[in-house]
Image (cartoon, rainbow, N blue to C red):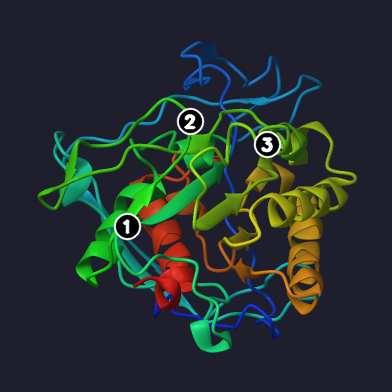
Amino acid sequence: MLPLTSWRLVRRVASGTFARGIPLASLLLSGSLACSSAPDGSTDGSGGSGGASSGGAPTSGSGISEGASTTGGPGSTTGTVGAGGQAATGATTGSGATGTGGEGAGGDPSGSATSSSSGGSGGSPATGFQPCPETGPCKVLPLGDSITFGLGFDGGYRVELFRLARADGHEITFTGTQAMNGPAMVDGAPFPRNHEGISGETIQQIANRVPTPALRDVPHIVLLHAGTNDMVREANGANTRLGALLDELIAEAPDALIVVSNIIPLPFAAASVDAYNATIPGLVEERASAGAHIIFADQFTGFPTSELGDQVHPNQAGYARMAGVWYDAIADYLR
């Protein structure tokens, strides 16, 4: 694995231009290992049947099935990625990053993986836009599929994101209607275990949850990582479907900051991922230029395949890396 330097990438205001070559992270599906509950408490097994087995070529089924990923056990991993690397087609390389993730010896994962940074074009309240309230927690909606759910590490990127925000004196909470997961406590504080990540969902299925039930709690910030399942089921037109989802989020949550990322690597569908990721900055820029409160975060650049626990979902270090990217994107908007 190449040496990591810093995950801090260029920040951009919501109405301006953004750094190119910053692919975003994504969530993936898992039909058999993770399931989420619908608002009525019923179990949602939306992973689909068939699909590609991790590390192998996709099959004709809809969805991806993965092997189990463990999150406990002793030992630690340290990932270092050099300055950038080839981004998606037409993009330039981004800056490197340094992340250290250790697998805690069971128990509360709040004492594990840490990340020093993040990538992506973040935001700045220089335009006067401030989505978070002056008092009380800023409500953050993690929206997506099994990567948002946190398959492979209980709580996923939300654990480290919560820790990073608290370390800088910011008060955040997570919203969402799906089955709660994650540790009870992080660094001595109750961890908000809500999210809106459903295993196996495509962009269109995620869009079907907007505005109801996903926006039920009126989030101040939306973190969207979507498209991994589309790469397996139907990659053609994924960018068009993402654009429609963005327009729906903008219309239904006009006062929220919408942070859109590209998807993290999916080794057995690399060409589809590169083609899809290359379109996302333009989709975001177009809407930001029209006045929407939307920014891009790069979850792809510098993400090593060694931080994929099953060739689809991040391991603990990978989720910590994702948290750093999200945090850099939203830090200037937090109070």
* Residue type pointed to by label 1: Pro
Q: Residue at x 60, y 52 (%)?
A: 224
Q: Residue 61's quadrant in the figure? A: top right
Which label's residue is closer to the chain start, 1 or 2? 1
The percent position of residue 14, horizontal first and vertical second, equals 63, 77
The percent position of residue 318, horizontal first and vertical second, equals 42, 53
Helix or strand or loop: what does disc 1 sit on?
Answer: loop
Question: Relative to the observer, which residue lies in front, 96 or 215?
Answer: 215
Helix or strand or loop: what does disc 2 sit on?
Answer: loop
Q: CA distance from mark 3 to mark 2?
A: 13 Å
Q: CA distance from mark 1 to mark 3?
A: 25 Å
Residue 69 seen in the current view: yes
Q: Which residue is mark 1?
A: 137
Q: Which residue is mark 3?
A: 206
* Residue type pointed to by label 3: Ile
Which label's residue is closer to the chain start, 1 or 3? 1
Q: Residue at x 58, y 37 (%)?
A: 214
Circles 1, 3 touching at the beta carbon (< 8 Å): no
The percent position of residue 126, horizontal first and vertical second, equals 53, 88
